Amino acid sequence: MSATVATAQPSDRKRTAALTLAALGVVFGDIGTSPLYTVKECFSEFTGLQPTHENVVGILSLITWALIIIVTLKYVVVVMRADNRGEGGVLALMALVSRQPAINPRRRRFYLMIGVLGAALFYGDCLLTPAISVLSAVEGLKVATPALDPVVLPISIGVLVALFAVQRFGTAGVGGWFGPITLVWFIVIFVLGLRQIVDAPQVLWAFLPHHAISFALSHGIVTLFALGAVTLAVTGAEALYADMGHFGRTPIRRAWLWLVLPALLANYYGQGALLLSDATAIDNPFFRLAPDWALYPLVVLATIATVIASQATISGAFSMAQQSALLGLSARIRVEHTSESEFGQIYVPAVNWLLLAGVIALVMFFKNSTNLAAAYGIAVTGTMLVTTILVFALAVRGWKWPWALAIPVFSLFLVVDGTLFTANMMKFHEGGWAPIAIALAIFTTMFTWMKGRAAGIAVEKEGALPIEDLIASISPGRVHRPQGTAVYLTAFSGNAPGCLLHNLKHNEVVHEHVVLLTIEVGNEPYVTASQRAEVGHLGKGFHRVVLHYGFMEQPDVPRDLAPLADRGIPMDPMRTSYFIGRNAYVGATRTVLPRWQQKLFLVLSRFAVSASDFFGLPANRTVELGSRIEV
């Protein structure tokens, strides 16, 4: 036994090391490229701060303790405990909290709305991250030579267009390079910072928290403006939690504590040391850290690092869109798998091109990273607030934390998150309106879809016929019963689906075997094979089947129905037909929705993809029967 353990340990360490390296490229790209613009924005015209010794040390102390309190204590130590069967992220957290026992319906709806708000804010972050990251990297060219200023915007747009254009090919081929390249990035920024710290070691005093407190007490309201810029240092913290399911807690925690945090602090302190010796470097202190010969290579490396950071954000948006559709928070969308071996490698065309249009619009409107920085932060801090509220509910209800522990811990997090959110709201007129407008539009769209679907379901239920009544009415000789199996998709397992009634009414046909199929997506990310199918036999060749999926899974109905042949339901692929109702929603004269919401829902319903595409039904064996539903 000891020999087995001895051989297993090196294997486990090797796997953890590989996951840690892979996590660098996916999890830490956003927060890892924050040094490109954070210190510069702390001393921008918006804050009005000058790079004096007291201001530099105070700002560095604020950045240091933001990284320690928000990222290390909140996310790494506390929030990453809130895993939904290993998965993280705001929707996974919402689902986890919602399924806790003894939660009344009103509070469950509140958690649902909070989760939807978090998802909407996340999409705002997905638009801003590629824009500010790539633009900040390419702006390094202006440091090399001011004559290149006119080409910064076209090059940035070109990089972004190329990035979104290659999404349909997937990242499986180049994804293996993300970790090693990001590792090089962190080593480089660590070395660049260390060079300056050696020349001005007094900057290390900023690690003491009393410098942050002194700065806040002496600057009053200006501290809020400064905190709006300091927030840029923690953008990407949510990714530690959202990507937990791909890499696990241990690799992410090790990467953060052993490499990412030391590299970030070294670079921030290096920029501070540079400003203490040369205040004119404030135009771009990150690129001023590099010697002249390394400037162009650093611009190239920074651009690649920001592309990797943007890729992780885009992939997160695809995953969020799929989860939202499965949970019924948004209309069904077309999802393409870009890798046969890598689970989770998906491409969502509609989301991809909407993101590209939004990112290009932001770059064209704001024109430089300083202006974009004013817009950045609100979406991030808003998502952090949502996460804190949901984890607090989980800690009390799920983890059974005593109030004496939960209140002081989460009060600290809420005060920090609330202060940063307030600080970023002060940038509303300078660009902070952008993420709020984006989040509001997405929240309104998702909320409208949920209300519209609920109204449509209520209308369907009103005219539904109990399946037992239909079966009882079928007698030999009255209808033709051809051989084979017909699968009817229905949202209500107890009622006869409309497409079955249409087929019976117009064609007088009921197959030898009829499967009434309901697909349910639960609050868990994955469902085991043994729990996938629930089967009931109703008599006269009718069968009720419920397929259970997690919100991280892509439904594949033919694959998951095939094993039911062993449970009394013939599922020969060549003798099985699928019937689905293609509901056409139309406006009702008397509607339960406000008129504007009714019109928006009708527009959204027209863009929803067919259930046959979403559930992987074979096109040559699927029949769609339409019906009109007034909402």
Image (cartoon, grey):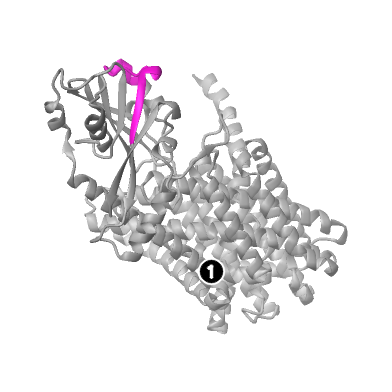
Visible residue check, residue 261: no
Q: Give, as a three-letter code, the residue at label 1.
A: Ala
Relative to residue 482, is residue 146 drawn left or right? Answer: right
SS of the residue under disc 1: helix
Q: Is residue 463 left or right of residue 99?
A: left
Residue that carries the numbered disc 1 in the rendered image: 434
Residue that lies at the very extreme toward the front in this rendered image = 506
Which of the pair 493/428 is nearer the observer? Answer: 493
The reply to whether residue 8 is visible in this rendering is yes
Position in image of residue 605 (x %, y %): 39, 51
Q: Is residue 553 above or below residue 237?
A: above
Q: Residue furthest right?
A: 293
- Residue 275 spot, x, y in % from top left: 74, 73
What segment is highlighted magenta in the picture? Answer: 563-580
Decide which of 214, 59 is in the foreground and name it: 59
Q: Position of residue 449 (x, y in %)?
A: 36, 54
Please rate how many residues cluster around mark 1, counting C-alpha atoms within 10 Å: few if below 14, some from 14 to 19, many from 20. many
Q: Tell me the residue at 53%/52% (across/down).
A: 239
Q: Residue at x 85, y 68 (%)?
A: 147
Give whichever of 540, 588 is nearer the camera: 588
Q: Is residue 68 magenta?
A: no
**The image quarter in which residue 114 lies:** bottom left
Say how many tags the image has.
Answer: 1
- 565 drawn magenta: yes
- Is residue 397 rendered to the left or right of residue 412? left
Along the line of sight, the residue nearer the viewer: 9 or 125: 125
Relative horizontal placement of residue 414, taking residue 274 as reference (left or right): left
Q: Is residue 624 above or below residue 5?
A: below
In percent of width and height, residue 58 lies at 62, 74
Q: Quadrant of the C terminus?
A: bottom left
Q: Which image quadrant for residue 371? A: bottom right
